Image: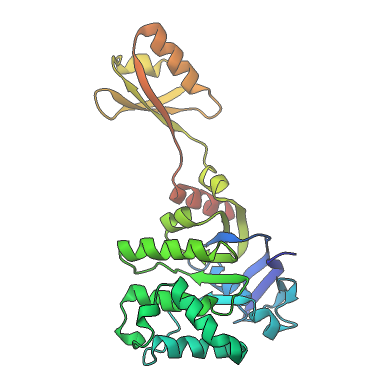
Amino acid sequence: MSILKVSHLSHKYALNWAIRDINIEINQTGIVGLLGSNGAGKSTTMNIICGALNQTEGTVLINGIDLRADPLRAKQQIGFLPQVLPLYTDLTVDEYLRYTAELRLMKSSEIAMAVEEVKEKCQISHFSNRLIKNLSGGYRQRVGIAQSIIHKPSLVVMDEPTNGLDPNQLIEVRKLIREIAQDRTVLLSSHVMSEIHALCRDVIMIEGGRVIFSDTMDAFNNYLQPQSLLIHLENPPVSGALQAVDGVTKIDFLSEKQVRIFFEQGEDIAERLVAASVEQGWRLREISMEKGVLEDVFKQLSSQAN
């Protein structure tokens, strides 16, 4: 059974369709990245998946439970960490977590243990009796994460969970998110490409209200085929000799001995450069392909949707 299955999801605001025929299926635990530019339909999709918005068309199933037909039972399977943390800052950490557990209709006999478990997992036990308003930004984020998993949901949706954190906090929150994803699915939205790259196993990209990419992170990162490579030559030739290698379209000397080679797609340029180096005594010491960065992939996929 799928943890999350979104089928033919569409939603209209007034006369305009925000999303159209969105299909998503997640069958295993781990972290899935959700990408989309402003106005792409990402937020609408997330709001519908979390039950905060009723779709115009289509279905959302959480562990086989129809979110629209049985919202109470389906929402018990969902944890949500919005970009703006849903914290009551005049409550202590314990008071707030007990309150959120009650909102999730947890059994009274289970709440105390659940509060202790999430505090330990999120490393906030030493702040049990501290007012949330007196916590740092990083620890507030941990409290927000704690409330999203206190009821042990199968699916946790996180919107920009590392936004605004300093480098040390960022590392710790990333580690926490990975731990959470070991036994549940995390659907993580972020505009920061490095975050998606660092955390996610799979990527879903929405643009123009439609899914335009859904695959592994490796497939996403390798979507643009390498178009250049770097070589290090101990005895570099003049530029004309390198340009003469069949398939080379452009060269760029980065230093006296390091050169970036641009080449035509489909050409086995590395093999030709090695052969030319041996034949002409260039003493090739290193060769490496350059892949398109995530931002380039994002731009290319976006342009295909327009």
Task: Check the image and report above or below for 65 versus 108.
Answer: above
Q: Quadrant of residue 184?
A: bottom right
Compared across the picture, whether 119 is left or right of 267 comes to left
Residue nearer the viewer, 303 or 258: 258
Residue nearer the viewer, 79 or 97: 97
Q: Position of residue 124 (x, y in %)?
A: 39, 76
Residue under the point 55% across and 68% down:
42
Compared across the picture, whether 215 is left or right of 86 comes to right
Residue 246 is at least partly visible in this image: no
- Residue projecting furthest to the left: 256
Compared across the picture, whether 94 is left or right of 75 comes to left
Q: Quadrant of residue 203?
A: bottom right
Q: Position of residue 188 (x, y in %)?
A: 52, 65
Is the N terminus in the top left, top right, bottom left or bottom right quadrant? bottom right
Label tally: 0
Is the C terminus in the top left, top right, bottom left or bottom right quadrant? bottom right
Q: Position of residue 223 (x, y in %)?
A: 55, 43
Residue under the point 42% across and 85% down:
87
Q: How is the image coloured?
A: rainbow
Task: Check the image and report above or below for 96 versus 79.
Answer: below
- Residue projecting furthest to the top: 279
Residue under the point 45% across and 54% down:
198
Residue under the point 48% across and 85% down:
97
Q: Position of residue 193 (x, y in %)?
A: 44, 56
Residue 116 is at least partly visible in this image: yes
